[in-house]
Image (tube, coloured by chain):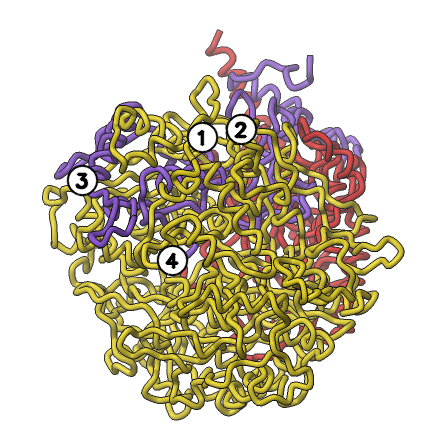
Chain colours: A red, B purple, C yellow
Amino acid sequence: MAGGLAHPRTLEYTDRDPQGPVPQEAELTAGHRVESGRSYGFFTDTTLCIGCKACEVACKEWNNLPADQPGLTGQSYDNTGRLGAHSWRHVTFLERGARATSMPPFQSNWLMMSDVCKHCDPAPCLEACPTGALFRTEFDTVVVQQDICNGCGYCVPACPFGVVELAKEDGKAHKCTLCYDRLKGGLEPACAKSCPTDSIQFGPVEALQQRAAARVEELEAQGQTAAYLYGTPGGPGATGGIRRLNAFFLLTDRPERYNLPPAPSRPSRNARPSFLAGLATMAGLAVAAALIGVGRR
Amino acid sequence: MTHRNRRPRGTLTGRLVGALQDWSVPRQLRGAPGHAKAAESAMSRGLRPRLEQADRVGTSICPYCAVGCAQLIYARDGKPIAVEGDPRSPVNQGTLCPKGAATFGLMVSPGRLDRCLHRAPGATAWREVPLDWAMERIAQLAKRSRDESFVSRLPDGTRVNHTLAMASMGGATLDNEENYLIKKLFSAGLGMVFVENQARV
Amino acid sequence: MPSLGATFGRGAATLPQWDLANSDCVLVMGSNMAENHPIAFRFVMQAKQRGATVIHADPRFTRTSAMADIYAPLRAGSDIAFLGGIINHLLQNDLWFREFALPYTNLSTIVGEDYRGPGELGGYFSGWNAEGRRYSPESWQYDGVVVPSSLAEGYVEIEGFAEATRRLHEGPTPKDPTLQHPSCVYQILKRHFARYTPEMVEQVTGCPREVFLKVADAMARNSGRERTGAICYAVGWNHHTKGAQIIRTGAILQALLGNVGRPGAGLLALRGHTSIQGSTDIATLYDLLPGYLPQPHAFRPHHTLEDYLKVETSPTGWWNNFPKYYVSLLRAFYGAQATPENGRGHDLLPRIVGDHSQLPLTVAMANGVIKGLFVMGQNPVVGGSNSKLVQRGLAQLDWLVVRDIAETDTATFWRDGHLVRDGEMRPEDIGTEVFLMPGSLSGEKAGSFTNTHRLLQWHDKVVAGPGDSRSELWFTYHLGRRLQELYRASTREEDAPIRSLLWDYPVDEEGEPDAEAVLREINGYTWPEREQLASFNDLKSDGSTACGCWIYGGVFPQPGRNLARARKPDGPEGPGTHLGWGFAWPDNRRTLNNRASADPEGRPWSERKRLVWWDETKGEWQSPDQIDFVKTKRPDYEPDWSKRPAGMDALSGTQPFIMIPDGVAGIFVPSGLKDGPLPEHYEPTETPVRNAFHPGVEGNPPAKRWAHDLNPIAAPGDPRYPHVLTTYRLTEHHSGGTPTRIVPTTAELQPEGFCEIPTELARELGLRSTDWVVLSTPRGEIETRALVTDRLRPFRLGERRVFQLGLPWHYGWAGMATGDVANVLTAVVGDPNTGMHENKALTCALRPGRLARRGGQG
């Protein structure tokens, strides 16, 4: 018997229940500890995705994101539409029309893919950000710091994947943080932790890349020859000055079929224009702050 | 004092001053590495997962399907703050499906009912009633319906001890202990035979 | 679940979910497992990643199909033809696991010579009584011996039943191990399924024969000593007027392939509610008492305790212990008031007089028989068949108590329901007094759930629920307390049951009863000392023990030891049986019938599939699991028939199915099923085609029907209702929708009702996705949105092309995600064994547009 076997450290928590989050719980749920100074990301293996959208729900529940409720779209089982300010995970459905009864292994007639911010390296959004709200964390992830973001929106067109969006409610830029708060507490990001079939895998990027390469080989051996990685160095998705995507994907059809750009690129190669724009913005804010300060006194 | 409280918060001025101090671009230009402390804002510095605020963690089981996924409920001041898959469980190993992942949302849903409502015969609206009043009224109605309909024996003398005039539906979403008391009271106590749950639905 | 009970002895999943990871082949059928049990499907995916073949057979290409190696499309309601064809393929080509099935099933048992099958009698089994629309099972019995049913009700209506079963004390059932006897089960089975040719399967199911044969080969290839396969099913198999027999067909298949009691093998019944297994074990069902003991029946020999025990106690096998369990239950119910004078409480229990299940309850309500109704955590307006009939019934009640976590569609039928909406009644005309009371969720109350693989798991009370919300434990306890008070002064004999009820549970300062005290009673204790019993083996039939549900015995063996709360999984070095996590009934056994994982000599069939084995030096069976057999019974043990052995003494060391009186799996079931000892394909009650096996006998002959003006049925082939309709669940919603339609994060994922329509039909009707459509059946009409997809397809059935439609049934008017109630369309018709409805296969009409009554209102 082999199903359901627990990580050895789990056994430390069997006599009494946890009194708080298990330290480095990510080791129990993902097999990896979370340590400052290492690069973390997602490997989303679309051949394991059952399209259940647990990732969407877990993300919204954890990050307290409101439902968009656009209504029934008629687009297969996709009713949340796209990534946006309130949808940091989004499952794309693609019915390929075939009515085959015998299929190459793993999800052939109905593609499902849980999309997310790619946490690019380097990240065009971060480079476009004039305020430094977008920054690269100690986990090598890209996060919008809400206490700094002024809603200028430069990051929105800069993102080649259409991930970043300004929220109507506060006018600020919002996107996946790779559960920055959870990482600081040694917890696996909510989407990856919930994923029933481990289609979303969390871990150090290098380890994930190795696992992903092995997975492609394994699929090829099983007859799924269309599998490839999107976003690993040198491959599709890591183009136009983007070295790699820290959240990368295993796909079995052309990137466009999943609403991914075939060859994303950085709109700008250095930060100076945005710095100058940012300087102007911040100067304006400083004046405003001073004025308000005066007014209050 | 934690760094979370280092700076006065709450006024627009304060926030702007903080933003200026935190403005990382100059620091990044000064040569700090890409993912340096230099770029970190106050909010980022103070960030921790809210699970750490829990004053109680309890073990639970997902309320939806019958797979039986284990959950941990994190609570503070008697209110849930998060529901997570229990990483110890051989059933779900910390994972949850979309419904299970929404358990926290279910517990705190604005759609949750929190008062007893009563609709009198022919009424067009609910009215709120005290729980105790509802309990007493229901007990009286149950007694009346039972007494009016109870059959001890059929005309041929066969013992039946039952009422056909009261029924119960539900149980598959309830605890074993609850089902046991329902069966014991309704069947063995009141003689109800129309006792059914969703096993057939 | 009579099918698994009749075949293997217990009506429950035979394997733990995590064991699916050890399977070499998983057939998912009658289930959309990836969507409705995603976490159980996790283990299917693990098996697949290790090389297992995954097969999905279903009318709809779903998210489960997307992960399968083989997808077999079949028309809804044709499952027996499909599976019967596989059985035929195995038998014709000798692909079954002979070393397993010969000793461990009744294949070699000889049936009485009067038996005839539907192939010989034009669609009926022998024993058909056309007037009563029922079968008499006399001719289904073994040659010269009547075997009691292993189901809850052991009694079978056969003259001289109890005496006829006593033959079981005298010797083994008649057998021909050479399988040559024309009346042995093997030969009957072979003749029966010989009609299920690949051509026939294709014509009836619409599944191309090459696909169906590929499935048959995959299953055969993954059986035998080294390999095992599992079948996962859900209500896609139950919800038919022949549902029990569909499951039977799957069970026969697994018995022939040696796929039961072994690692990675078995049948996993995937159940849809948290404790639907628990609420069957501790049955809030009309015909069962806790622990699968039959509710006494007025028209059966159940009058006195002695009568009842005489016909319900099996002479042989484990059920010979029946009196201990029943008498202990009566003690738990009535405490000191269970006396020898009142048959230890037997005289106090109510008698059933017929079928009192959900469907006849619906009809009884509509007919005004029912005055008061409790609805606890159920939403029958959305989930009940023929919703308008349900609503008509609710309007006839004097009073209705709805206990739920939110305002449900059922609770507001008088305001927003179809009676009002269709202009049939105004709220002012509806005389029902309605109470809506807030209930609790797990986490807001303590208690245990029993999951789909018999695993009891405790949940704590962590927080208080909102406002006046209370647990059902609180409600039931306090209602009982008040009623006992109201009846305290009564001296009437008819009030003795309520006055006699043992009802002394401790409560906390908020009045909440101690759930553990209830579980301790369920587990069992001595009477009157109330000392916890370690196991059901300690129960007695003399009134000195009390036990609320014998199969749960051992869950609370000592004070302070609630094993449902055990949280110790196996680590990576462990065996993976996880005996320290929760408590599985019976006796913490994780794989049922696991004696069958060893060969007749007691050796594992293979190292790869090792689970239980005989240790000669210790003189005991060994296993990382709890052993579902007498631990010290040698594999070569044979009963000494000269001593007229009873109970377990009458089963040999090679008879692993201890709940069955003759100890072997029932491929042919002589007793217990109401529609035949073998499964036969019958069309659904509403079907677009004739029954190709025997035109003229279309549907299951003894299927339950209830005549009512509001429940008209379309005749087979009615051209007004040409399409096949199946209702189903989505992963994003739960059942009647109450707990997902009120949560924004799930509501937005599937925000509105829809109907899946095959592309070809949509083209004919000029429909595009999100267009409005109207579906109709003789019961009613609903409007919903079209979802046009290639995932549904037309089926070619002989000369006919039939379209399959799919309709999620979660929706109603309450909450954030809304839609018309699918069950307005469905009928009150039922399986003869279980009384389950047929919402997975009916016929309907489809047209573009909206309903006139609400046109334009959105």
Per the image, the residue denoted by label 3 is B148
- Is C429 situated left or right of C267 in this image? left
Q: Is residue C236 above or below residue C324?
A: below
Q: Residue at x 43, y 43 (%)?
A: C744
Tag 3: Cα neighbours inside 10 Å, few (<14), some, or many (≥20)? few
Q: Under tag 4, what secondary structure?
A: loop
Residue B105 lies, in percent from the top left, at 48, 38
Disc 4 from disc 3: Cα separation: 28 Å
Location of mark 4 (residue): C301
Q: Nearer the viewer, residue B102 or C428?
A: C428
| Residue C528 - label | 2
Contact (Cβ within 8 Å) of mark 1 with mark 2: yes
Q: What secondary structure is found at the residue carrying circle 1?
A: helix
Callout 3 amino acid: Glu
The nearer-to-camera label among 2 and 3 is 2
Discs 1 and 2 lie in a common subunit:
yes
Q: Amino acid at mark 4?
A: Pro
Callouts 4 and 3 close, C-beta under 8 Å: no
User: Which quadrant holds residue C786?
Assistant: bottom left
